[in-house]
Structure formats: structure tokens, C-alpha cells
């Protein structure tokens, strides 16, 4: 699997050229999306035999939805909070 849309360079430009930050934001949002969709659609799974409700509902997997949200400006992060969390977690100082 590779990211072709949105373009990885565009996504990195929106996350300070930091691949760790990009992955952290996207994976956290993807987990939220998956949990939300599963919680909202428990009735659907009771009626139909569905393995992955996310792709059935949206046609996309959660990480693709998260990347699209990041590219579209819908998903963002607070730079100061992110920098503080990283600094607090640094045990080398």
C-alpha cells in the first residue's frame, strides 16, 4: 500500500516535514474514525454480516479518510502542545 492521493509531499508540508508527526496525527484520527463508525453502526452489523464497516460506509479505509482530512485542512494539530509533549518525553537531556 502506498499513499498516492493526497500526495505525500503535500501532507509532509502540512506537518512541518515531520514524518513522525504525519503518522501520529493520521493514525490517531484513523483510530477515532474507526471507533466512531463502529459505534454508530452496531445495528448494521447486527443486520448484515460485515467484516469492516468503515469501508462499507465510506468506501475508504480510516487512514485514507484521515489523510484526506489532513490534506483538506479539516484535521490539524496544535504545534505548541505537540512540541511540549515531545520535549517532556525526551529522556536524553
Image: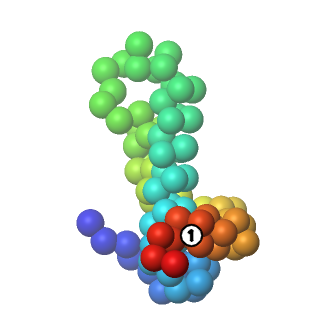
Q: What residue did someone put label 1 on?
A: 86
- Give the quarter of the figure containing the N terminus: bottom left
User: Residue furthest toward the left?
Assistant: 1
Q: Is residue 90 above or below residue 44?
A: below
Q: Residue at x 56, y 69 (%)?
A: 86
Q: Residue at x 37, y 72 (%)?
A: 3
Give residue 22's position: percent from left, percent from top.
50, 71
Q: Residue 18: horizontal and vertical position, in percent? A: 50, 81
- Looking at this view, is 19 or 48 the one in front? 19
Q: Is residue 46 above or below residue 70?
A: above
Label 1: few (<14), some or many (≥20) within 10 Å?
few
Quadrant in the picture for residue 56 = top left
Observer able to see residue 67 = no
Q: Quadrant of residue 73?
A: bottom right
Residue 56 in view here:
yes
Dot 1 lies on which element? helix
Residue shown at the point (54%, 44%) measured from the top left: 32
Whole-percent x and y of residue 68?
55, 64
Q: Nearer the viewer, residue 93 or 77?
A: 93
Which residue extends farthest top? Answer: 46
Horizontal side, residue 73 vs residue 25: left or right? right
33 w.r.t. 81: above or below:
above
Q: Position of residue 62 (x, y in %)?
A: 45, 50
Amino acid at each position: 500500500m502506498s499513499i498516492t492521493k493526497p500526495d505525500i509531499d503535500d501532507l509532509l508540508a502540512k506537518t512541518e516535514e515531520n514524518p513522525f508527526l504525519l503518522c501520529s496525527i493520521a493514525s490517531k484520527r484513523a483510530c477515532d474514525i474507526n471507533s466512531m463508525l463502529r459505534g454508530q453502526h452496531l445495528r448494521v452489523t447486527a443486520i448484515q454480516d460485515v467484516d469492516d464497516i468503515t469501508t462499507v460506509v465510506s468506501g475508504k479505509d480510516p487512514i485514507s479518510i484521515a489523510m484526506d482530512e489532513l490534506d483538506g485542512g479539516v484535521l490539524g494539530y496544535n504545534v505548541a502542545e505537540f512540541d511540549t509533549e515531545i520535549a517532556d518525553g525526551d529522556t536524553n537531556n
